[in-house]
Image (tube, rainbow, N blue to C red):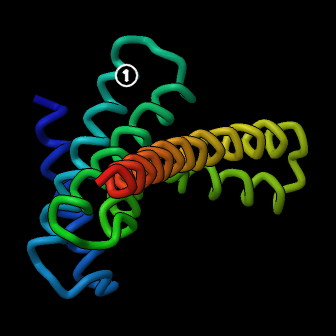
Amino acid sequence: MNLIIEGVFCFVCMLSFGVIFKLNYNPKFMIIAAMNAVIGWTVFSLSNSFGLNHYFAYFAAALTCAIMGEIIARAVWAPASIFYVIGCLPLVPGGGIYHTMLYAVQNRQDLFISAFIDTIAISGSIAMAILVSGTFFRLFKRRRQNENIRLNRRI
């Protein structure tokens, strides 16, 4: 039941984010992107509930959002960044960034370093997932183009 409530709030928040910041003027794209965020958050929540590593949960959720974003973008002829930016936004470690700066201002060096490393590791997990997804799809696209060139030469 908790996962359903989180999914509804995630959908509403990401839809609102897309509308407020006018990431794209097509409402259909914003709804699809918000659904992508819900899928990513669900993967993250399920990964955490199964006891997987915290950083792996972020990586798996961001990879899911990025792959879904690339697939959706090719299906609806839109930029992929619309879908995976909004999809990965609920995963951004805002609380970790806040606590990192709070501990820095309060001169609590041990907590600052711990929060800083944790926040950087989470951000790196998200960035690595997007990099892996983008690289995979570019390689797949390049391979298809090379096969089309070979087929055209034979004809």
Q: Secondary structure at mark 1?
A: helix
Q: Is residue 40 visible?
A: yes
Q: Residue furthest front?
A: 155
Q: Amino acid at mark 1?
A: Ser
Q: Is residue 66 visible?
A: no
12 on left or right of 108: left
Q: Give the camera-side residue of 46 and 85.
A: 85
81 on left or right of 5: right
Q: Position of residue 61 (x, y in %)?
A: 39, 37
Residue for badge 1: 47
Q: Position of residue 125 (x, y in %)?
A: 59, 39
- Residue found 9% across the figure and 72% down from its top: 28
Q: Position of residue 86 (x, y in %)?
A: 34, 63
Q: Position of residue 43 (x, y in %)?
A: 30, 31
- Residue found 13% across the figure and 65% down from its top: 31
Q: Give the camera-side residue of 111 and 74.
A: 74
Look at the image and tell me in which quarter the C terminus lies: bottom left
133 on left or right of 80: right
- Residue found 54% across the figure and 42% down from its top: 132
Crowd around label 1: few <14 · some 14–19 · many ≥20 (10 Å)? some
- Residue found 86% across the figure and 46% down from its top: 108
Q: Residue furthest top?
A: 51
Q: Give the camera-side residue of 46 and 75.
A: 75
How many badges with numbers are in the image? 1
Look at the image and tell me in which quarter the N terminus lies: top left
Q: 4 above or below 17?
A: above
